[in-house]
Image (cartoon, coloured by chain):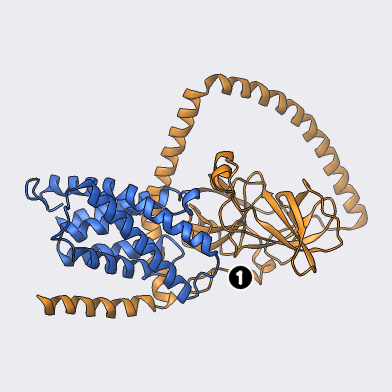
Chain colours: A blue, B orange
Amino acid sequence: MIGVILAVLLVGAGLIQDFIPGVLVLGQVKAPILLSLVLYYALAHSRTTLLWAAILGGILQDSLSLVPIGYSALTFCLVGLWLRRFREVLFTQSLATAILVGGVGHLLVLGLIQILLRLGEDWGGGSWGSALMRLLGALIMGMVTTPVVWWLARAMDERVGNLSPTHAEI
Amino acid sequence: MRGKGYLTVVILIVVFLVVLNLPLAVTGPLRMAARELLTPSQTVLVRFHQSFHFWWEGWVGAGQLARENDRLKGEMALLRGELEKADRANRENAELRDLLGLKQQARVPLVAAEVIAREDGGGWWQTVRINRGDNHRIRPGLPVIALEGLVGRTTNVTPNTSDVLLISDPNCKVGVRLSATGEFGILKGSGLAASGMPQFDVVLPAAPPEIDYLAKEGPVLEGEKVVTSGLGGVFPPDIPVGVLLSSKMDITGLFQRARIRPSVDLARLSKVFVMILPEETDPGLRKSTLMEGDAP
């Protein structure tokens, strides 16, 4: 059942993320719905599920953009595994955690992808100013999006019995 | 447990070393499959959003709509008269062309499409995705227009979707001509999509596209209309591109630069048309096509 819910959430997240336009004043950064989902799986499920979510979510995100396939999957995995290290010390049910993790996670992912794009010469445009604006946008969009996605994902997991409401880790 | 963790990391590194270097023949179908999977739902979502938007506009601005309806009726009557004049002029033009033995310009077929997604997640490129593709005779490198003027050109094409690189993208270069003075130049996007929304302009001035290589002594008039020149082989001539805002001499002193306001509000595109140019006229297009792995 975890796999089915994961697939449904990934397709839904990809659809909505692709539909909602980026915010112009935040460097046209989009709401990181797929990443928020990966961050949720990093804290709420096993490492294997996290890696599945990160790889499939990353490939889906790259498929829907001009970014070479693999960049998002790689960064999702790295950030997801890094976040998992703090699983025991985070108050995973707290709104503040979702905001903090979402902001920092998206900042890291966008920064890493930007570095990969520069290194791979896949993208040569843009000034330092626009890069900084994009990072600020990533932080804000991550902070706004993640709590909503976590709440929805947790509600679905609880409904189908993937997480028990009383023993939910997140 | 620790050994298992290392194993995961090692497997991950190996997988990504493979994935990041996969050739286009492998990543192409992967990308296509993901896009095709989402296209039907995206089209439904866009149509639902548009219906809701129309309903909301009707609900909120019923009085304004009635006034606008009146104004449009008047405008339509005027335009009918203009159309008749234009018909006469066309007939006369055709007769004169016949007399001079000139060939008639063929009309370019258009494919109407809806915008189903906008740009990538990081704002690195200025693109939109439309719900028409290979199955609708679209191929990479074709010009895309809206009712008001030029939008961009198609890039990645799957059976039912195409990416459109907007003229606001720094990688989209268009040969243009100033309509009044006849000066030629090359239009280049400046990054952010220009929006007609003044409240955004206050917070962050949207960078307007820029024309380079205008002759240094050439007359450049503010408010002048800018159209495609037809040079370069990608865009046909005389498609409206925008209005000239300001100009200045380049730092080298060799040519002038000018900023324009695009005719089309690129931030609010919903319906566009792809010009299906005959294949034999665009040998250079495929070279300029964005493919994965090329710098877009």
Against A120, residue B162 (above or below) is above
Against B292, residue A32 (above or below) is above
Q: Residue at x 43, y 38 (%)?
A: B49
**Secondary structure under the numbered disc 1 in the rendered image:** helix
Image coordinates for residue A56, horizontal then vertical, percent? 29, 64
Q: Which residue is mark 1?
A: B288
Is residue B188 shown left or right of residue A116?
right
Q: Residue at x 18, y 58 (%)?
A: A43
Q: Nearer the viewer, residue A42 or B106?
A: A42
Image coordinates for residue A122, horizontal then vertical, percent? 49, 72
Around disc 1, counting alpha carbons within 10 Å, would you say few (fewer than 14), some (14 to 19), or many (20 or more)? some
Image coordinates for residue B213, horizontal then vertical, percent? 76, 65
Q: Residue at x 46, y 33 (%)?
A: B53
Q: Amino acid at mark 1?
A: Ser
Is residue A170 shown left or right of residue B43?
left
Q: Nearer the viewer, residue B35 or B266?
A: B266
Is residue B61 shown left or right of residue B46?
right
